[in-house]
């Protein structure tokens, strides 16, 4: 789950990371009032969960409260990469002397978190990694020990940070690690972390990604989710406890088990098809849950055929069949459906679906080939 900049920075502040004075505004009038409180010269920043806000005109300087109101009016009426701007962050403008990148993420290859820093802050770190990777300092963190003082000093030395800033930089780096680890984040990033002309270190921008699987431990963070950023189908799927990701293909997939779902998608691709989604209904799925999953798949107008691949271990095949028939009665689709049921009560499930004139298959290979053929037809 992505957090907005203002949410990330508010969280950073709780861990002692210095951020600019600022508040969020939902109207241009509020933006003017905040600018007056901050002394007039402010930065108006669109709050949408996409990159490239500055290039799209979503981040602008205002030199007076009146100008802040005018700029906020323009930005609040924008769409950036298809997402409407509903809020703006009004921050006190900073006098920037130098920009630094500082971030922590998961290094799956090393199986531990990694802190990354670069003197080339203020630009996308992916671009720095592509063009000048030598400018990025990386240090892995033992999750049982956390970020150590000597590691923070090594990072400061590696990015040629003036020694007078090492102490504060170390506090910021350790604060970022605590924000990352205590909130089950997969990314905590400050870009840029600036040195101002007043010789202060300030986090001008912030970004955090939180592991969805850990949100049951963080109800306060779960409430921050921005539904504008995700597909309506994904929001609906979450209500029923379904793991769903929308893709761009024509073959809708309903599978029980994440590994089996990935395999199903791979085999569909192998035989020349394109999956329209990843959907794992999980173990022990009820008829109601299966019906909800089918409705979600059918809400995608690009879907030309649906492939069911159910291995009945915990999930009973007859329950899946009931869910399919329930959804068919409600939605009344007019597209082909290919079903492969194997496992507990598979025969009973197949008999129930035979009345609905669905295409059946005994193996996944057979099912994938039939689904691809039906989609092309």
Image (cartoon, rainbow, N blue to C red):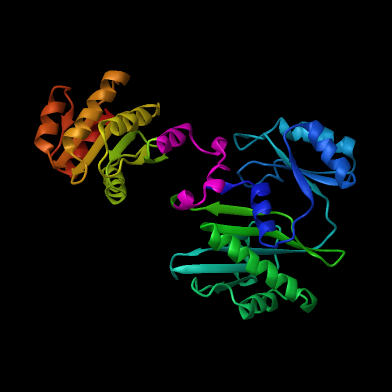
Residue 113 part of the magenta segment: no
Q: Position of 67 compared to 362: left or right?
A: right
Q: Is residue 212 above or below residue 17?
A: above
Q: Answer whether residue 226 is magenta in the image.
A: yes
Task: State left or right for residue 252 relative to residue 371.
Answer: right
Lateral position of residue 352 relative to residue 282, left or right: left
| Horizontal and vertical percent position of residue 95 | 85, 58
Q: Which of 274 and 185 is in front in this view?
A: 185
Q: Is 18 situated above or below 49? A: below
Q: How many marks?
A: 0
Q: Compared to 257, does 161 lie above or below? A: below
Residue lying at 67% horizontally and 78% vertically, measured from the top left: 153
Rendering coords of residue 339 (x, y %): 20, 34
Q: Evaluate whether residue 372 shows in this view.
A: no
Q: In which quarter of the image is residue 76?
A: top right
Q: Residue at x 54, y 68 (%)?
A: 114
What segment carries the magenta color?
Answer: 214-239
Camera-side residue: 357 or 16?
A: 16
Q: Compared with residue 34, is residue 217 higher up or lower down, i.e. above or below?
A: below
Regarding residue 260, the answer to whether it shows in the image is yes
Residue furthest bottom in the image: 150
Q: Residue at x 42, y 38 (%)?
A: 238
- Percent of width and height locating residue 15: 66, 61
Displayed quadrant of residue 40:
top right
Q: Position of residue 96 (x, y in %)?
A: 82, 60
The quarter of the picture where the C terminus appears is top left
| Main secondary-structure element of the magenta-colored stretch | helix
Identified at 29% across, 30% down, the residue is: 288
Q: Quadrant of residue 323?
A: top left
């Amino acid at each position: 789950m992505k957090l907005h900049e203002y949410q990330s920075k508010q969280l950073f502040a709780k861990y002692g990371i210095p951020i600019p004075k600022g508040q969020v505004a939902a109207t241009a009038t509020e933006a003017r009032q905040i600018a007056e409180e901050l002394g007039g010269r402010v930065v108006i920043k669109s709050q949408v969960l996409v990159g490239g806000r500055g290039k799209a005109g979503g981040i602008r300087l205002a030199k007076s409260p009146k100008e802040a109101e005018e700029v906020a009016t323009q930005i609040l009426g924008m769409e950036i990469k298809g997402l409407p701007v509903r809020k703006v962050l009004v921050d006190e403008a900073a006098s920037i002397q130098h920009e630094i990148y500082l971030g922590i993420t998961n290094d799956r290859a090393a199986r531990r978190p990694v802190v990354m820093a670069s003197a080339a802050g203020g630009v996308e770190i992916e671009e720095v990694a592509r063009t000048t990777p030598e400018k990025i300092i990386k240090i892995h963190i033992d999750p049982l020990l956390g970020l150590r003082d000597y590691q923070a000093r090594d990072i400061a030395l590696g990015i040629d940070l003036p020694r007078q800033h090492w102490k504060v930089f170390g506090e910021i780096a350790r604060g970022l690690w605590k924000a990352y680890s205590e909130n089950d984040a997969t990314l905590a990033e400050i870009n840029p972390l600036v040195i101002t002309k007043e010789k202060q270190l300030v986090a001008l921008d912030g970004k955090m990604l939180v592991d969805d699987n850990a949100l049951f431990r963080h109800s306060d963070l779960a409430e921050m989710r921005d539904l504008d950023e995700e597909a309506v189908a994904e929001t609906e799927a979450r209500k029923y406890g379904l793991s769903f990701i929308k893709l761009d293909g024509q073959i809708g997939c309903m599978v029980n088990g994440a590994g089996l779902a990935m395999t199903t998608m791979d085999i569909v691709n192998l035989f020349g098809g394109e999956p329209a989604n990843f959907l794992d209904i999980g173990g022990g799925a009820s008829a109601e849950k299966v019906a909800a999953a089918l409705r979600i798949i059918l809400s995608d107008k690009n879907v030309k055929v649906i492939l069911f691949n159910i291995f009945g271990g915990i999930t009973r095949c007859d329950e899946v069949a009931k869910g399919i028939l329930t959804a068919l009665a409600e939605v009344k689709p007019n597209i082909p459906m290919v079903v492969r049921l194997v496992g507990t009560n598979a025969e009973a499930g197949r008999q129930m679906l035979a009345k609905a004139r669905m295409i059946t298959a005994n193996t996944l290979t057979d099912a994938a080939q039939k689904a691809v053929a039906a989609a092309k037809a």
